[in-house]
Amino acid sequence: MQKIKLSSKPFCNDFHFLFIGVVCLLLSFKFPIFIILLFSYFFFIWKKTRLIIPLAIIITLVFISYSLANYKLQPKSEGKYKDVFQVVESSETTLILKSDFKCIVYDSTKTLLPGDIIEAELQIYSLSEASYLGDFDEKNYYNAKGITNRGKLLNYKKIGQKMCISRLKWHCLSYYETRLDEKSFSYLKALIFGINDLEKSIKKAYASLYISHLLAISGLHINFMYYILVKLFQRVFKIEGEKLAVGILGAYVIFIGYPVACLRAFLFLFLKLWNQKGRLQYTKLDILSISYIGMVFIFPLKAFQMGFILSFLISFILIFVEDFYHGHSKIKKNMVTSYLCILTILPFLINQTHTISILGIGLSFILGYGMSKLLLPLIFLTLFFPNKYYEYIFKGVDNLLSYFSNQTFPFSISHMSLFWVIFYYIIFIYILICMAKRRKKFTIFYIILFFLLMNTINKTNIFYKVTFIDVGQGDSILIELPFHQGKILVDSYNNIDYLKSRGISSLDYVIITHFDQDHMGSLLELSKSFKIKKLFYSSYEDVKKISHINAPKVAICGGESISIGNVFLHFIGPLHNYKDSNSNSLVLFFKLNIYSFLLTGDMTSEAEKDLIKRYSTNLKCDVLKVGHHGSSTSSSEEFLKYCLPSYSIVSVGKNNSYGLPDDKVINRLKTISKIYETKDCGNIEVLIGDSIKIMPYRSSKL
């Protein structure tokens, strides 16, 4: 029967219009301003096409699916919880348990397997949220997997088991674990089973060379498997084998837990085969759009995951290159495709690594092409003929990539906000249009100018800014003077990712109030990642503890001052050696314009009394960094009467084992100031211009 051209059908080559409508709807869920764009798009469709009713139906269905998915994600209140659970997934470090909700347990007993039924008592916690722009959002990440809580397994009793796909997968993994070395097994898990737990240094090497896509099961892997299966059926069994190959791949995708990129690649392959055998003739863009709409409808919360977004962006650009790029050389076409793919997802790569490297981009095509030709055949050899001799090849691959990644000389770049991402894609779309219209004057120069402009603006403060970084149970405070006059970091704990997200490469002063781990635990990594021009520490601490830190060191104590730009930093404590690290904390007083700050480290009430005697009413401040994370050993009633802060900042971790902040301290502070806690607010920024403005990342104050 002759195929019917899609032009005779209502959705003739128009599925991308429905795809765009769904994208607008999803954006409006996260950014309400896009509701305007959604209504404008409806108006456009109503005027230009006949798709207003199909679009309305699909939008309604996706909205209902998204609403139901969110409705099911009702987290349990924090506390102890007893119930019967099924083990859904099990690894060396985590369990996923399911009853009427899903919970991830990080302290795995390593004795429970998927499918086990247990009676258990859990300590339930809520999932953490992002603390700053670009921070990992545990809640959103696990919600997309249907997980609503984090928990600790207090006790359990196994009462049964049931066979499930996860259990079969676990047994399969166990088979290979006993027959492969650790390195080969980690690659097999990543490229066959979709479990990427390679070493962080190796993942970083792949990312810095812009070939990290090779570590995810994607269209490259699915198409390779399809090709091998079809050839096997045709040559060995003398059958066509296409439908059977697709059926086997479908079972494989379900077996490994249908990772997003893998499922997208399978749907594309399935629809492509159906298109060839059926009566309708869809375009590749139609197939991509149908795949997207279908996956969003079935897994609406996964639509916001990076893997989901990147998978469809890459698929789109591959279609674009094939249909619009008219280069004659296959190698040149492959190079153009490779670099366009990188440019397509570059904002996401930047927001993941906070670096960019022109040399890394230049090497990506050669390394990516070579690695794709090596890794896939090698991993299938590992799958069908497992032994421990593959270790030398995989180690060689890792060493080679590590060497090249160390030669890329990346430079720091700040996190790209939604505004900058949209601006970038406007420029990128213009370049694609130039390619499609064969305009030879289009140039990558626009993108280079874009990044220079963005990085300059993002790194330039026009106001004084003090950021109390949400580091968990610890302290770290970044002070930034306007127009690059200086950056001062007070204490360094769990703060590296935030500093990198800001595109910071050097710090003028680093001040360590005292040598407790929760104030200097990240100092060594800080010194390796950033240039420290001068490091200040309490003269009553043992300098040998920081002898390994590569930075000029200056011991300082109460009564001394330093300056940077037009700002004077006064160290008003400790006034003498208290023989106690907390009491010997450096106490910092400074003014930005007319607004004063008092940072007290872990200073105790004993040291507070001496400060009162010495400085009296001069202790009054606008912003107080509450001492010792809100502990009762600090922030005495008498001391607070002299400080009288308008705003009090408590740097404290959620569910910390110390029970901080102390309720009595909070009650004292409530009578004189507004209280902000990092565990509730995330990062807390204080902007100083003609007025003072407190900007918590998550709106919460006492």
Image (cartoon, grey):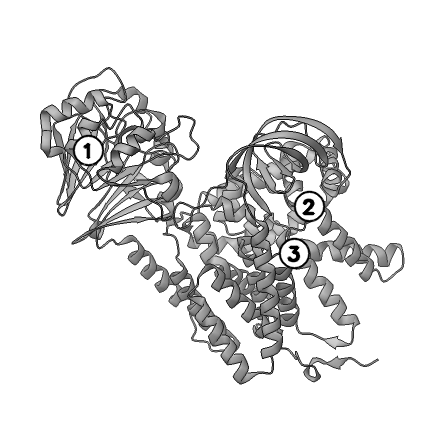
Left-right relation of 447 to 630: right
Q: What residue type is labelled 2?
A: Ile
Q: Does 267 appear above or below 514?
A: below
Quarter of the rendering containing residue 52: bottom right
For residue 502, say whether it is visible. Answer: yes
Instruction: Give the quarter of the figure containing the N terminus.
Output: bottom right
Q: Residue 458 or 645: which is nearer the viewer? A: 645
Instruction: Provide the secondary structure element on which disc 3 rests.
Output: helix
Q: Of label 2 and label 1, which has the lower sequence position?
A: 2
Marks 2/3: CA–CA distance: 12 Å
State which mark lies toward you, 2 or 3.
Answer: 2
Q: Marks 2 and 1, Cα distance to the nearest angstrom?
A: 55 Å
Q: Name the residue under label 3.
A: 220
- Mark 2 or 1, which is nearer the eye? 1
Residue corresponding to mark 1 = 588
The quadrant in which residue 487 appears is top left
Q: Residue 189 carries which label?
A: none
Circle 2: is it few (<14), some (14-19), or many (20+) Cα within 10 Å? many
**Picture quarter with the C terminus:** top left
Under mark 1, the amino acid is: Leu
